[in-house]
Amino acid sequence: MFSNRENVNTLTALLVAHGVRHAVVCPGSRNAPIVHNLNECGEIECHPVTDERSAGFFAIGIAQSTGQRTAVCCTSGSALLNLAPAAAEAFYQQVPIIIISADRPQQWIDQLDGQTLPQPDALRQWVVRAVSLPEPRDDEQRWLCNRLCNEALLADGPVHINVPISEPLFDFSTAELPNERVVRRISGDALAEHLREARRPMVVVGQTAPRSPIIPTLASLERHAVVLSEALAGKAEPFDIVLHRINGTDGEASLTPDFILYVGGTLVSKRIKKFLRKSGTPVCRAGDITDTFMHLAWVADTETVATAADILNRQEPSASDFQQRWHTALDEARQRIAQFQPPYSQMAAVKELEAQLEEADYDYQIHYANSSAVRLANLYATRHAWCNRGVNGIEGSLSVAAGFAATSDEMVFCVIGDLSFFYDENALWNSNLRGNLRVLLLNNGGGGIFRQLKGLEQSAARDPLVAAAHQTKAQGICVQNDCGYICAHNGQELLTGIQLLINSGTSRPMVLEVFTDAQADAQAFSDLYHF
């Protein structure tokens, strides 16, 4: 029988699944549920050592002798600090030891309770990965507990897994360990086999730099799978429109993949994340160990994906019904976007800018700020869109575009909302700037994205407090920073302003401020999705 603590059982099951066969165990009451499980499971041999300082180095010796990852388990409090010398030695030798520390519940840390100190980051400097497991109360926390264990056990080098355990500690009433999801590394051959055997394979592409080595590989994978990307990966596929149309319909099942390869960074679309999380489809992640769709099964690196693509390209691709259904749905969505004529709004401004840039006779780059701006990029961008999607904050969008322009011979455009612009207005207070920086400022008097959040309209705080409603204009900022300034209040002024923004010859940056109504901007999005 095993402990009744879910996080302890999850950890035990995954230690076994990841091939851990030796554990050095130190005495203590808080770690007794862990030690009990390690001894009970049968696959792991336990080695008792009383002194934690010695136990850590003893574990290093076992790992060196066996060539296998070795665990060392201690109780809470200063016991963990005694493992620091061994952690440091393992870090610089890159010996794969797994330091497991039992901990008191978070609410009792620093409350003068026995054997308590902040443990989660105590060894951060000497381990390649440190995680602290939750005590699960719902399915999302169970997913988190599983994910954190897998992340730590996939890392190369020493890791620290901290395990808070609430009392009562000594209830050993669980008949068997849970059947936990195991995330494993995958070879190029195995990845190619999964893609080949899948009836509905899909490649989802997050934010990717234009010079990324993965780009040529993605082009070849299009012959074998549905490839969905956003403007931040160089190609804006209107899958958001498709997912909106099929939500809850019979078509949803027919467009659901049975294997997902996820490459690149963050995704803007919440719909695609919700759709794929709900699907339950196993995911192979290319790159860092992130579980965006909550069904991660394998991890690969860029070279592995390239190897799989090479293997697949030696065979003739066979067009599947799944690919055809997606291609048809995306073509219909593109037609809807092209046919939809938004009234004067931020959407109309971005659509017109992208249309006129397509006719430009010079090279250019385009940056989009976060929130509404980048969502408009996913509708109308015709080339790679740069955006601060690492953390998705509104700050710094104009400064990044300014830095890009200051070191580029190309024209650089920045499409930015009012809050982002005024937050980062000092980006224009910069002696490095030249006339190749052009800014399309979308000013609807506040955070427009908040008018698209269902339910928030019920709050009286939405406009003045949440959306930070204002009446600020950019003209004075442009004057003080010697930047060209033009503005638009209607469709005709918008057309003229964009022509000037794109074609004017000037040695200083230029800003086109487009004044729109926030409600009209939100309505344009709604009308497009129901067009």
Image (cartoon, rainbow, N blue to C red):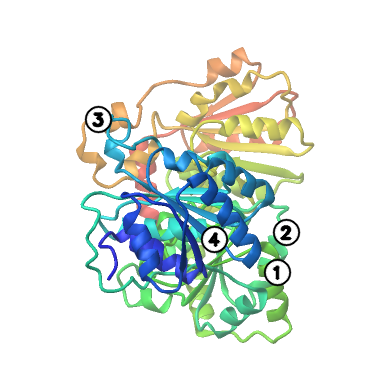
Q: Residue at x 52, y 53 (%)?
A: 378
Q: Secondary structure at mark 3?
A: loop
Residue 386 pos. (x, y %): 62, 44
**Earlier-in-chain disc, 4 versus 2:** 4
Query: Would residue 151 appear left or right of 95 to someone viewing this image?
Result: left
Labels 1 and 4: the sequence-earlier one: 4
Looking at this view, is 347 or 147 the one in front?
147
- Separation (CA) of disc 3 from disc 1: 51 Å
Residue 461 bears which disc, if any? 3
| Residue 302 image-quadrant placement | bottom right
Q: Earlier in the sequence, mark 2 or mark 1?
A: 2
Write down the residue under mark 2: 213
Name the spot of residue 387 as percent of width and height, x first: 58, 43
Cα separation between marks 4 and 3: 54 Å
Find residue 85 and report its image quarter: top right
Disc 2 and disc 1 in contact, CB within 8 angstroms: yes
Q: Are marks 3 and 1 in contact (CB under 8 Å)?
A: no
Disc 2 marks which amino acid? Answer: Pro
The residue to which callout 4 is attached is 70
Residue at mark 2 to residue at mark 1: CA–CA distance: 9 Å
**SS for callout 4:** strand
Mark sitting on residue 437: none
**As rendered, which of 7 and 291 lies closer to the eye?**
7
Location of residue 481 by image quarter: top right
Label 1 SS: helix
